[in-house]
Structure formats: structure tokens, C-alpha cells
Image (cartoon, helix red, strand yellow):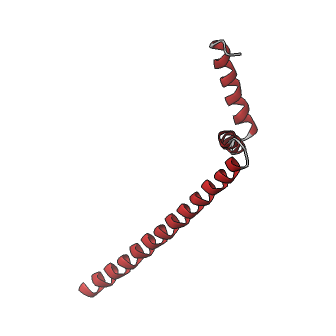
Amino acid sequence: MDEITETSQTVAAGQIRSIIERIERLEEEKKTISDDIKDVYAEAKGTGFDTKAIRSIISLRKKDQSERQEEESILDLYKAALGMV
């Protein structure tokens, strides 16, 4: 019975080690990609583009058309209420 428990613990230890190592690799890839994105924004800024506008466009492109329209309608309503239109 002790042999089964020991084998189970060895398997569990191997699995957790594998999971942790995969997460660590993915975290490193995520950092690399994040650094690459920062470099592209810096390049855009260096060329004279407004990075805040670029970020807004990227955010909008992630949403479907109906979601964008709903947000724009609410924003227009709020701006009108504040006399900004």
C-alpha cells in the first residue's frame, strides 16, 4: 500500500512540476510579446502617430458592431446631457 502512495505522490509531483514549467514558459512568452507591442507603439509614436488614438482603435476593433454602436449611443447621450455636443 505504501508503494502505491509513493507512486501516486511521484506522479503528482511530476504533473505539478510540468504544469508550473509550462506556466513559466508562457509567462516568459507573454513578457516578450508585451515588450514587442511596446516597441511597435514606440515606433508609431516616433513616426508621428497618436498612440492614444491607436489604442482606442484597437479596443474598438475587438468589439462587434452592435457593441460599438451601443457604447457610442450611450456616450452621445451622456455628452448631450452635459452640453458637450
**Percent coordinates x, y for residue 40 in the rendering:** 67, 55
In the picture, which quadrant includes the N terminus?
Answer: bottom left
The spot of residue 7 in percent (x, y) is 33, 84
Q: Which of 1 and 52 is in front in this view?
A: 52
Name the residue at the bottom extreme. Answer: 3
* Among the 4 quarters of the image, the one containing residue 74: top right
- Residue at point 69%, 35% (across, down): 67
Q: Is 46 situated above or below 13?
A: above
Q: Quadrant of residue 71?
A: top right
Depth order, front residue of 34/69: 34
Residue 5 located left or right of residue 45:
left
Label tally: 0
User: In the figure, 9 relative to 76: above or below?
Assistant: below
Q: Which sits in the foreground, 37 or 81?
A: 37
Seen at 49% across and 71% down, the residue is 22
> Residue lying farthest right?
65
Q: In which quarter of the image is residue 50?
A: top right
Task: Give percent across and percent down for residue 72.
Answer: 70, 28
Image vertical order of residue 33 relative to residue 41, above or below: below
Q: Is residue 39 left or right of residue 5?
A: right
Indicate left or right for 2 with 14 as reference.
Answer: left
Relative image position of residue 77 (x, y in whole percent): 67, 18
- Please state which of residues 41 and 63 is positioned toward the viewer in this rendering: 41
User: Looking at the rendering, in which quadrant would you find the C terminus?
Assistant: top right
